[in-house]
Image (tube, rainbow, N blue to C red):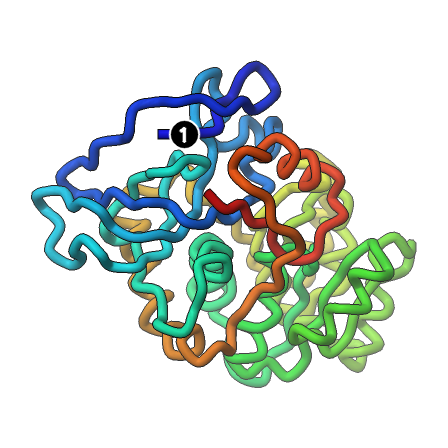
Amino acid sequence: MKAAIVDTETLVIRDVPRPVPKPNEVLVKVRAIGMNRAELPGIYGSGHARAQGSIPGIEFAGEIVACGADVHTHAPGDRVMCAGGGGYAEYAVADWGRALAIPATMGWDQAATLPVALGTMHDALITNARLTQGETVMIQGASSGVGILGLQIAKLAGASLVIGTSTNAARRARLTDHGADLTIDTTQPDWSEGVLRATNGKGVNVIIDMVSAPVANQNMKAAAILARIINVGRLGGSIGEFDYTLHARKRIAYIGVTHATRSMDELRAESAAMHRDLWSAVTAGQLCIPIDRTFTLDEAEAAQAHMRTNSHFGKIVMRT
């Protein structure tokens, strides 16, 4: 099969053996691949699947062509969207618990944008932040695919005010089309004051932070007493100043999340909880990420170069 292989700091297209599913896995003929910043070298520490000779790619959509001996929930021919590994390829494998049936009306490209974002934002907003109806939410870095879906999930969960941040004016202007009631430019030195004004001085109840170090202290200034800040990503830096007094005075619950240290049982549980709470909205088309640009698998290096510019809105997709 054809795959994009890591060669030093670039991707090259090579023919490699088709993967063989383990007993708990399904083998998928990949039709579309959702791209994620975590697949870039150096992001979140070491990145995902960036070792020499490895195949990146953590989400994809396609048809099941084979099932492992312990898989009883899927069958060859099923259309699925998956969170897995080695997705930059014509075939890839995923655990059965992380392969979700694609709604009949949904195409390959859109399906490939959803698995990681759905799992990440349900876990952040619903499981960890315990968002309840009427609370206020801010999504830091809201113009990414994950961020846009976070805006929509917050609205769906009944948030009374949803704030999205972006440092780019054009992308910021589009956030209101995807669930944001208010947008904030975090390049402004006093941006947290705008959040306090919008919440009548109370601050927001929940902050989903995909930026971290540069915004950590202002996040706490913008937070309400007893707020929950969920640290999902560190695209702006993983080491910075932290105002412990402000953290304590506001009694903020500061929670870090990652998939990197979860067992497969935990990942399956996350997927099942998301499916329980959000799948009717997915099927109804209420949760949908805009596609910024599509590439072919042969253009994998160009697609990652586009992602490195940080100029996209929503998701970048590759087709096999």
**Residue 123 visible (yes or no):** no
Mark 1, other Cα within 10 Å: few <14 / some 14–19 / many ≥20: some
Would you name the residue on which mark 1 appears? 2
Residue at the image point whose x is 54% and y is 69% from the top: 288
Work out whether residue 143 or residue 273 is closer to the camera in this orientation and state it: 143
In the structure shown, which secondary structural element does the residue marked by tag 1 occupy? strand
The residue positioned farthest toward the right in the image shown: 189
Q: Quadrant of residue 45?
A: top right
Residue 90 rendering spot, x and y as whole percentages: 38, 38
Q: Along the horizontal axis of the image, is 224 left or right of 275?
A: right
Residue 205 horizontal side relative to residue 118, left or right: right
Compared across the picture, whether 26 is left or right of 243 comes to left
Q: Is residue 254 above or below residue 42?
A: below
Residue 146 % position (x, y): 57, 57
- Asked whether residue 76 is in view, the answer is yes
Q: Residue 155, relative to residue 146: is it above or below?
A: below
Place of residue 304 in the rendered image (x, y in percent of width and height, measured from the top left): 63, 36
In the foreground, 212 or 75: 75
Q: Residue at x 33, y 38 (%)?
A: 91
Q: Residue at x 44, y 17 (%)?
A: 53
Q: Amino acid at mark 1?
A: Lys
Closer-to-camera residue (91/196): 91
In the picture, the quarter occupied by the N terminus is top left
Relative side of 230 to 276, left or right: right
At horizontal 21% and vertical 43% (from top left) the residue drawn is 25
